[in-house]
Image: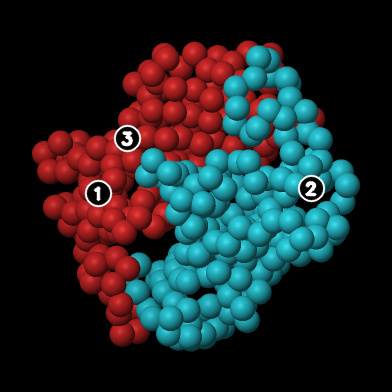
Chain colours: A cyan, B red
Amino acid sequence: MSDPGDLRAFLAEAWQHLRRGVADAKSPARYPVFATVSPDGTPEARTVALRRADPQAGVLEVHTDTRTPKVTALRATPVAALHVWLPRARLQIRVTAQVEILTGDAVSDSWNQIPPASRVSYGTEPLPGQPIDSVHAYDKPPNRDRFAVLRCHVSAIDLVHLYTVHRRAGYARADGWAGQWRAP
Amino acid sequence: MSDPGDLRAFLAEAWQHLRRGVADAKSPARYPVFATVSPDGTPEARTVALRRADPQAGVLEVHTDTRTPKVTALRATPVAALHVWLPRARLQIRVTAQVEILTGDAVSDSWNQIPPASRVSYGTEPLPGQPIDSVHAYDKPPNRDRFAVLRCHVSAIDLVHLYTVHRRAGYARADGWAGQWRAP
């Protein structure tokens, strides 16, 4: 751990964990919980896989099928909360982000980098979440037209470090990520 | 694993995990992510500790400080999404619940059962999330008046089991938890 009173270093640690999540499928930062608000105003939360983390741009990306309820939710309220808990570091990362839904030509490069065996995550029939008659009554054909990148433009980050004495800080894009200690 | 085509058994497994979360602080079900909608319509998500899981009543409980943003959120929109991921079982449990905020005499029994050393989680000064001048510029006096039980009356459960062939099912209080297979 760097100087525990260094706000910038605290934020840099969090981004390091997020970048490791992209690079290493075994990192706990690989699978954030992604919370949205459904069109009827209900909170929703599900696991996603982190595909990009860019500290300079303040951007995180996840991939999804366009026909999932989370995309329906984001079309109504284009904001997400991402949550990561890092057990060894005892660090909770909470991100608030404005989400842009990219499809079609804008995501060709991302699609081309997905191994064919993984493309079956985009195109489930019937649609994800729909009732089916028996446990395995569905197909998973890859469908490029249903592939979307959720580009999450981070607006705020809240970090809580459960240490001998807890540390908590908040950061906002609006003030250039200067950061502010918070009561935990 | 029980018969993979048995809807009732699938739900029973999920409740078993939730009950273990209450009993065993090392279980991954101990620490759900708790998502709410803030008064301005933004999704929020944070870790909570599971304190009660009652399959018969369809109730989950967590404890909180009444002055946290999640209570503010719940006063405006009394609905929460709880998310648990069980790595070994490869099971995602998603719960939607109507949340009742209990305080005062109604929570005396719960308060009395909390070890004194843990009561410091209720009463942080300044209020949790408030700006502070330096990293450790806060106190954690126990404050019974700020202790609340969030009684989560489960209305729906969605389970996803990542197995050789994935399984997903949805359950609702409205139909007596009969359950329905879903496309994953």
In depth, the one of A116 and A31 nearer the eye is A116
Which secondary structure lies at badge 1? helix
Q: Residues within 10 Å of mark 2 (few under 14, many from 20)?
A: some
Q: Residue B127 carries which label?
A: none
Residue B109 seen anywhere in this rendered image of the structure: yes
Percent x, y for residue A46?
Answer: 55, 44
Which secondary structure lies at badge 2? helix
Of all residues, the one furthest to the right in this rendering is: A116
Residue denoted by label 3: B98
Mark 3–mark 2 contact, CB under 8 Å?
no
Q: Which amino acid does label 3 sit on?
A: Gln
Horizontal arrangement in the rendering, residue A90 relative to residue B52 (left or right):
right
Percent x, y for residue A28?
Answer: 64, 56
Horizontal arrangement in the rendering, residue A169 relative to residue A10 (left or right):
left
Q: Residue A144 carries which label?
A: 2
Horizontal arrangement in the rendering, residue B173 relative to residue B170 (left or right):
left
Horizontal arrangement in the rendering, residue A106 relative to residue B87 (left or right):
right
Q: Mark 3 lies on which chain?
A: B
Percent x, y for residue A164?
Answer: 43, 69
Q: What residue type is labelled 2?
A: Arg
Q: Which chain carries label 1?
A: B
Q: Disc 1 and disc 3: Cα gap in Å? A: 12 Å
Which secondary structure lies at badge 3? strand
